[in-house]
Amino acid sequence: MKQEILSIIGQIRFLMVLIETGELCEYEIQFRTNCICADLERIADLLPEVDA
């Protein structure tokens, strides 16, 4: 799971570079962001519940 989290961090950093350089259109940014969110949700489902 640690490797998956590190991979998502890499995806976010790469996305930030692409946004900064203006290489992505709005649709591509939304698509990549949705993919990252889906990956995070999948990892969250694997984690145990914590009482707040």
Image (spheres, grey):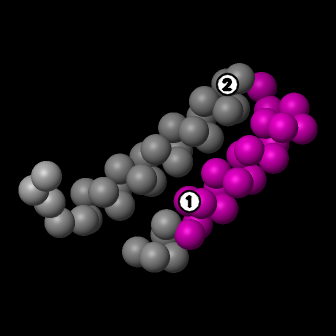
Give the residue displayed 43% in from the left and 46% down from the top: 38
Crowd band around label 2 with a 10 angstrom C-alpha radius: few (<14), some (14–19), many (20+): few
| Horizontal and vertical percent position of residue 21 | 89, 38
Q: Nearer the viewer, mark 1 or mark 2?
A: 1
Check residue 8 for magenta coloring.
Answer: yes
Does 19 appear in magenta? Answer: yes
In this rendering, is residue 22 above or below 32? Answer: above
Q: Which of disc 2 and disc 1 is earlier in sequence?
A: 1
Q: Which quadrant holds residue 23?
A: top right
Q: Residue at x 66, y 62 (%)?
A: 10
- Of 30 and 9, which appears nearest the observer? 9
Q: Amino acid at mark 1?
A: Ile
Q: Which residues are magenta?
A: 6-25
Regarding mark 1 in the picture, which secondary structure is present there? Answer: helix
**Residue 27 image offset from top left, x and y in percent:** 67, 25
37 with respect to 9 (left or right): left
The residue where tag 1 is placed is 8
Q: In the rendering, at what x and y percent does residue 45 appear?
A: 25, 57
